[in-house]
Amino acid sequence: MAKNNLEDELDDELMADKSEDIKKKSEEPSSELDLADTLADQLEDEEMVKDWKYLKLSLEQENTNNYYLHVNHQSHGFMNYLVSKVLKCNGVSFAAYKNTSLSPANIYIRTDGTRDIRLILKEAVKLMRTEWKGMGNAVAAMKI
């Protein structure tokens, strides 16, 4: 009997040690989760600090009437919208974009040579501003 009681006590101690180990292990992932949450919060704070007011563009001339416009940090939706406005400008024969995760988005623009590329891009920006202003007025007129 005494032996059984001693074995039972040892078993109880071992079980207690194992449960403490399990508790410690279960606490570790929560600390890792806390660390992950902290890092995610820091990244969100850094993104809020970024100034998204201006686009970073660079223009590269391939030959006389062919250009590449490199646009940093923009989505497919914005690139599609920008290309649609460039296509509406006089003097543009062709425009298309390519956006990958490996390099900045590129817009290929072919002109007919009658207008300067910078004037074409300014006209496209004017078209976008006009449309956005109209959307702002429409939203302001909405009654909720």
Image (tube, rainbow, N blue to C red):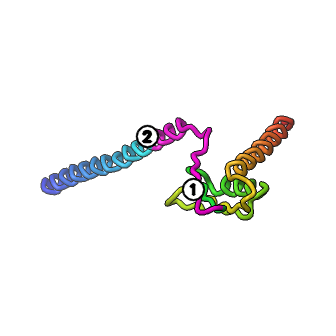
- Given residues 96 and 73, the one toward you in this image is 96
Q: Is residue 18 left or right of residue 126?
A: left
User: Which mark is drawn over residue 38?
Assistant: 2
Magenta segment includes 35: no
Whole-number angstrom distance, CA of label 1 to CA of label 2: 41 Å
In the displayed structure, 93 sits above or below 128; it is: below
Residue bearing mark 1:
60
- Given residues 5 and 118, the one toward you in this image is 118
SS of the residue under disc 1: strand
Asked if the residue under mark 2 is in contact with the one under mark 1, i.e. CB atoms within 8 Å, the reply is no
User: Callout 1: 10 Å neighbours few (<14), some, many (20+)?
Assistant: few
Give the residues in magenta.
Answer: 40-64
**Which amino acid, by three-letter code, is at mark 2?**
Thr
Instruction: Find residue 106 and report its horizontal and vertical position in percent.
Output: 59, 58
- Given residues 33 and 62, the one toward you in this image is 62
Residue under the point 74% across and 59% down: 92
Instruction: Find residue 59 and report its horizontal and vertical position in percent.
Output: 59, 53
**Which amino acid, by three-letter code, is at mark 1?**
Glu
Q: Quadrant of residue 68?
A: bottom right
